[in-house]
Image (spheres, helix red, strand yellow):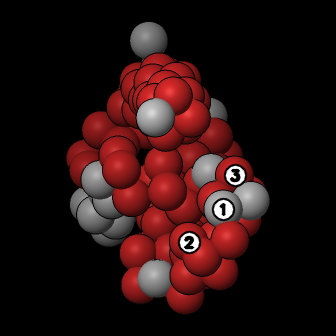
Amino acid sequence: MFLPLVYIGVIWFLFNRYKKNHQEIQEKIKPCLKWAKAQALPIPTKPSLIEMFLIENRYYWYLRFPFGLIVPFLPITKKVHFYKQEINNLWEIWEREGSPGKQ
């Protein structure tokens, strides 16, 4: 009975830590997204926080045998990787332009 509670506690701790880091990153890229919107550049659809948590922390899930083997083949894996790639591309374009609109 005690072991599942510890496991749930660890997952909750990891999720809250990831959520805090995710919010910091979203605040950091907000000026870039505003600039991209003003330039009429395509902005990818953001996956949900839970999808991002599951895919970006996939190495933790590999330790959990059945679920870890499924994660790389989920359709959300491609969605999350595409989002990260497109945001990185937008960020590079934004920095090449000299970070216009940055306060």
Residue at horizontal 72 percent and vertical 65 percent from the top: 62
Q: Quote the CA–CA distance across marks 2 and 1.
A: 6 Å
Q: Earlier in the sequence, mark 2 or mark 3?
A: 3
| Dot 2: element | helix
Residue 4 coordinates in the image, percent (x, y): 49, 39
Is the Cβ of the residue at disc 3 closer than 8 Å to that at disc 1?
A: yes
**Residue 59 to residue 65: above or below:** above
Instruction: Please state, as top left, top right, bottom left or bottom right, where the C terminus lies in the image.
Output: top left
Question: Is residue 51 placed above or below 4 in the rendered structure?
Answer: below
Q: Position of residue 102 (x, y in %)?
A: 46, 21
Question: Which corner quadrant of the image does residue 101 belong to?
Answer: top left
Q: Residue 98's spot in the image, x, y percent?
A: 62, 34
Above or below, comparing residue 34 to residue 80 in the picture: above
Identity of the residue drawn at 56% across and 71% down: 67
- Left or right: 78 with respect to 65? left
Q: Amino acid at mark 3?
A: Tyr
Task: State the mark number for residue 52.
Answer: none
- Determine whether, in the image, residue 9 is placed left or right of residue 42: right
Asked whether the viewer can see residue 84, the reply is no
Q: Are marks 2 and 1 in contact (CB under 8 Å)?
A: yes
Residue at coordinates 57% horizontally, 47% vertically from top-left? 91
Number of numbered callouts drawn = 3
Amino acid tagged 1? Arg
Percent x, y of residue 13: 52, 24
Q: Which residue is mark 1?
A: 64
- For mark 1, does the 10 Å Cα neighbourhood hold few (<14), some (14 to 19), or many (20 or more) residues? few
Tag of residue 67: 2
Element under label 1?
A: loop
Rate crowding at label 3 as few (under 14), some (14 to 19) or many (20 or more) other CA atoms within 10 Å. Answer: few
Three-letter amino acid code at disc 2? Phe
Q: Nearer the viewer, mark 3 or mark 1?
A: 1
Please give the residue where the numbered disc 3 appears in the rendered image. Answer: 60
